[in-house]
Every structure is written in structure tokens, then in C-alpha cells.
Amino acid sequence: MEIRLPIVLQGGIYTVHSKIEGFLQRMVNRLAFGYYRYGPPDPRQDYLSRLKRAVERYEETGNLEFLVDAANYCLLETAMPLHPNAHFKSTDSQGSAVKRDT
């Protein structure tokens, strides 16, 4: 089963690079399959720990499947955070977690 979803920004269709679109499609497919197989996401699950393990498995194997899983765990943690201080605060380049040294 494949679910095709357009990416909508500001009321218009956003054309993304085919590899990004493929990555997002794999995320949707795996979420849909997980829902079909296991039911809806459980807000009691520790998705952050699963995310860390998926990244470890990618580093060990190079299998991109684990990065798709990690992205889905990011999505699920964002939707149902267990972190006691979970919040969203936009930062500029000075506060970025991936700030480059110049």
C-alpha cells in the first residue's frame, strides 16, 4: 500500500527534489504500515530512545531504512513528547544546534 500526499506550503504545491520526495514518501508508507500492523501510535512510547537506536543502527550498517525510521521517531516525539520540558522555540544561527564555525 502506498499513500501519495502532496507537500503543501502557504496554500501552494511545493516541488521537492525527487530524493527528498522519496524520503518523505517512505516515511508516510512506513507510518501507514505501522498503523495497519500495530494500530495508532502510543503516546506512552519512548520515541526518543528509539530514535537514538535507529541512528546507531544506521551508523553500524549504512542502511537508509534506519534514517527513515529515525525521522518518523522525530515526528512521533514531536507529536507526543515525553520530555518534561518539550517546547518549540525558533532559533537563529547563533542558537543553532548545527552552527558552523566561521
Image: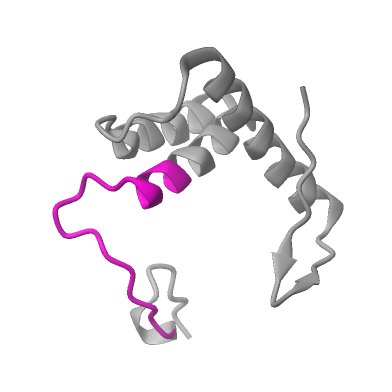
Image side of residue 68 versus residue 54, left or right:
right
Comparing 72 with 32, the one in front is: 32
Query: Predominant secondary structure in magenta?
Result: loop
- Would you say residue 63 is visible in this rendering? no
Quarter of image, res 54: top left
- Image x and y of residue 63, in percent: 63, 27
Q: Which residues are magenta?
A: 74-92
Q: Nearer the viewer, residue 23 or 61?
A: 23
Please report the residue visible at 36 percent of the width from the left and 45 percent of the height from the top: 77
Indicate yes or no whether the magenta region holds residue 82.
Answer: yes
Residue 80: where, in percent of width, then height? 33, 45
In the image shown, does 9 or 85 lie closer to the viewer?
9
Decide if residue 32 is on the left or right side of residue 75. right
Side (left or right) of 56 relative to 84: right
Which residue lies at the image location 73% right of the left edge and 65% below the top edge?
Answer: 8
Q: Residue furthest top?
A: 37
- The answer, for residue 54, to whether it is visible in the render is yes
